[in-house]
Image (cartoon, helix red, strand yellow):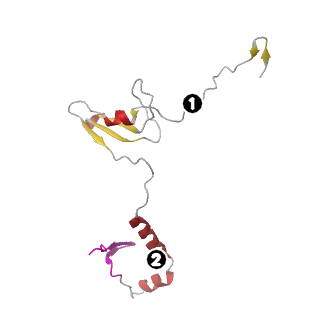
Amino acid sequence: MRESRRGPLKSAVPSNVVSPVRRCSRTACGRPAVATLTYVYADSTAVLGPLATYAEPHCYDLCAEHSERLTAPRGWEVVRLADASGPARPSGDDLEALANAVREAARPQERAAEGGGTRRTDPMEVARRGHLRVLRSPES
């Protein structure tokens, strides 16, 4: 920075940092947005879902309070999509299916034998279509 008689020169562009947090679109509400509202005029429907990945011109970001209190015009329907407020954690069934798939992929010699007509049957397997298997419930 250069010095002038009045002190250091300031930049013409303010150095305020722009917040990466999107704010509620409602007037005078500065809370962080948690949901996105979209109107489908052809169906007279207001769709409220999780916060969109980026701001769209005809969508409205709403905070938790405004998204809970949302009402639609008379004759319109409000569709509230499930809020996935975090990455979905794998369930025990998902992890077991993944482990079984890894085990099956690690046995290429058994797969070759299955292709020859000597197919191993799993007592839990009910049906098969391609690489997908329908399994019996462990309770039954």
Label at residue 140: none
Can you give x and y, in whole percent of width and height, for residue 46 in the image? 30, 36
Number of the label disc, if any, that sits on residue 18: 1
In what element is the residue under mark 1?
loop
Q: Which residues are magenta?
A: 122-140
The residue type indicated by label 2 comes to: Glu
Q: Residue furthest bottom?
A: 118
Residue visible at 34% across and 75% down in the picture: 128
**Horizontal and vertical percent for residue 135?**
32, 73
Residue at the spot 43% in from the left edge and 54% down from the top edge = 88
Residue for point 46% across, 32% down: 23
Residue 132 sits in quarter: bottom left
| Front residue (pair 116, 67) | 67
Say if mark 1 contacts mark 2, CB within 8 Å. Answer: no
Residue designated by label 2: 104
Q: Pinpoint residue 28: horizontal percent, then vertical percent.
A: 42, 23
In this orientation, which residue lies closer to the viewer: 76 or 124? 124
